[in-house]
Image (cartoon, helix red, strand yellow):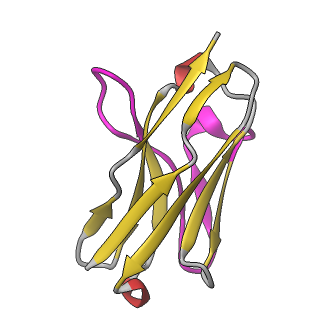
Amino acid sequence: QVQLVESGGGLVQAGGSLRLSCAASGNIFSINGMGWYSQAPGKQRELVATISSGGTTNYADSVKGRFTISRDNAKNTVYLQMNSLKPEDTAVYYCNADDGLQDYWGQGTQVTVSS
């Protein structure tokens, strides 16, 4: 089992920045890819960014050039640096990890961007 705890959400004005963190614990050696997903009110959860165990990254088109995902394997933590935030980025952001057998999810952290 893997446990994920997110932090770093909050309220920010448009154009501002936030950094989300996700700390993994438990059977961390089983983790392959990690990522961030967002879910806005009334919408489905969607991919924001992912990073493989080897460091390969993938981004949703809507965040390319603004968000950066990174991973510190020594700290078992994945980060999402969010710059140039827009009101449409407002959502609950969830951390995800997979071990090749199943997905694990954090509890989510709210990001609100005011115009």
Indicate whether residue 58 is drawn in magenta. yes
Identity of the residue drawn at 57% across and 57% down: 21
Instruction: Give residue 104's quadrant in the image.
Output: bottom left
Instruction: Give residue 73's quadrant in the image.
Output: bottom right
Residue 44 as seen in the image, left or right of residue 78: left
Indicate whether residue 78 is drawn in magenta. no
Of 67 and 107, the residue lying toward us: 107
Identity of the residue drawn at 70% across and 19% down: 14
Identity of the residue drawn at 27% across and 20% down: 42
Query: x and y percent of residue 23 in the render?
Result: 49, 68
Identity of the residue drawn at 43% across and 78% down: 32
| Rendered view: 12 above or below 34 | above
Query: x and y percent of residue 103 in the render?
Result: 28, 66
Among all residues in the image, which is located at the extreme top? 115
Which quadrant is home to the C terminus? top right
Instruction: Give residue 86's quadrant in the image.
Output: top right
Residue 102 as seen in the image, left or right of residue 83: left
Query: x and y percent of residue 96 in the render?
Result: 39, 60
Of 54 and 85, the residue lying toward us: 85
Among all residues in the image, which is located at the extreme bottom? 29
Residue 62 as seen in the image, left or right of residue 92: right
Of 3 and 101, the residue lying toward us: 3
Which quadrant is home to the N terminus? bottom left
Query: x and y percent of residue 65 in the render?
Result: 75, 40
Read off the magenta span: 38-67
